[in-house]
Amino acid sequence: MALFATKRRLIAIACIVFLVGVVAKIPAGVALQFAPELLQTRGVSGTLWSGSIDAVAVDGQVAGPLTWQLKPLALLGGALAADVECSLGDGFFSGGVKLRGDTVTLTDAKLAAALGDLTRRASIGPSQGVVNATVPLLEMTAQWPTRVDAQITIKDLQYSGSGPEILGSYRLTFAPDNTSDEWPVVGTIQSIDGPFNANGTMSLGDNRSYAIEATVSSTADASNNLKRSLAVLGPASRDGSHTLTLNGSL
C-alpha cells in the first residue's frame, strides 16, 4: 500500500513538472495576449520561460527594453515569478518579481533612475533628482505596501517651478522589522546634504493611509527664499526647527 502511494506521488510530481515545462515554453507574445489592457508592449520575443520586450507601457509610463528569466518552481505554489531586468530611461531596475493574486513581491531588487522618469504621470510639480533604491523585500497587496525592507535615496533634488532651487539629498529607510504583515509600515526620513536638516518618519497604514512627521530647519546653505518658505510650517521651536506634518490617503 505504501509503495502504491509513493508511486502515485511520483506520477503526480512528474505530471506537474511536465505541465510546468509546457506552460514555460508558451511564446511570450501569446501569454501577453491575456495581460490587462493598461499594459502595452512592443517587440516581444522569446517564451514565458525566458524572453524580452523592446518597450512596455503601463498607464502611459514607458520603460524598456525588459528581459526576464522565469522561476518555474513558483508555478507549483500558484505564483508567477521571474528575475527581471529593465531599462528606465537612463536608469535601470533589476530584481526578483513574484505575482500571486493581487499581491506583488519584489526581492533583492535595485533601482536607479531620474526622478522625472518615475513620476512623469504624477502631480508632484516640476522636480528633478536621481533616485537610487536597494530593496531586499517589498510586498504590495492591492498596489499598497504591506511588508517593506528598503533604502531609498533621492539625490540632488531640485524644484524648478518659478525659479530653480536646490533642495538637497534625502534618504528614506524601511528597516527589516517592517516585514511582519502588521500596519503601520514605518520608515525613517533623514537629510543627507543641502539647505535643510530634516529628520522624521513616514508611516503607511491600512486603508491606503500615510503620515509624515518631521522636524525641518535651514542650514547655512539655504537661500533666503527657502528660509522664508519654512514659515508656512508655523512658528519655529527654540532650536529654530519647524514641524512638518502631512497625512492623508491615496
Image (tube, rainbow, N blue to C red):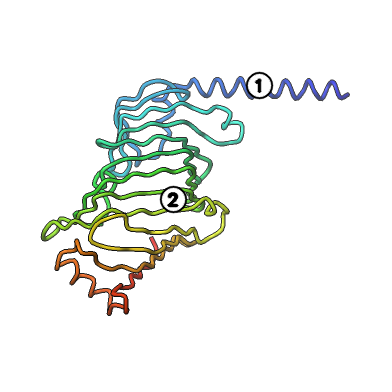
Q: Distance between the Cα atoms at labels 1 and 2?
A: 34 Å
Label at residue 143: 2
From this view, report whether residue 68 is shown above or below residue 93: above
How many residues crowd mark 2 within 10 Å: few (<14), some (14–19), many (20+)? few
Foreground residue, 84 or 194?
194
Q: Residue at x 11, y 59 (%)?
A: 163
Q: Secondary structure at mark 2?
A: loop
From this view, report whether residue 34 is shown above or below residue 1: below
Farthest residue, direction left? 163
The tag earlier along the polypeptide, 1 or 2, is: 1
- Select label 1 or label 2 by which is in front: 2
Q: Residue at x 32, y 78 (%)?
A: 237
From the top left corner, tell me how far across and down residue 17 is, in percent: 62, 22
Label at residue 120: none
Foreground residue, 242 or 203?
242
Q: Amino acid at mark 2?
A: Gln
Q: Amino acid at mark 1?
A: Cys
From the top left corner, tell me how far across and down residue 99 is, in percent: 50, 39
Q: Which image quadrant for residue 215? A: bottom left
From this view, report whether residue 187 is shown above or below residue 131: below
Work out which quarter of the rendered image holds the C terminus and state it: bottom left
Residue 93 placement, left or right of 75: left
From the top left corner, tell me how far across and down residue 242 is, in percent: 30, 73
Q: Secondary structure at mark 1?
A: helix
Foreground residue, 73 or 40?
73
How many residues crowd mark 1 within 10 Å: few (<14), some (14–19), many (20+)? few
Farthest residue, direction right? 1
Residue linked to disc 1: 15
From the top left corner, tell me how far across and down residue 212 is, in percent: 38, 65
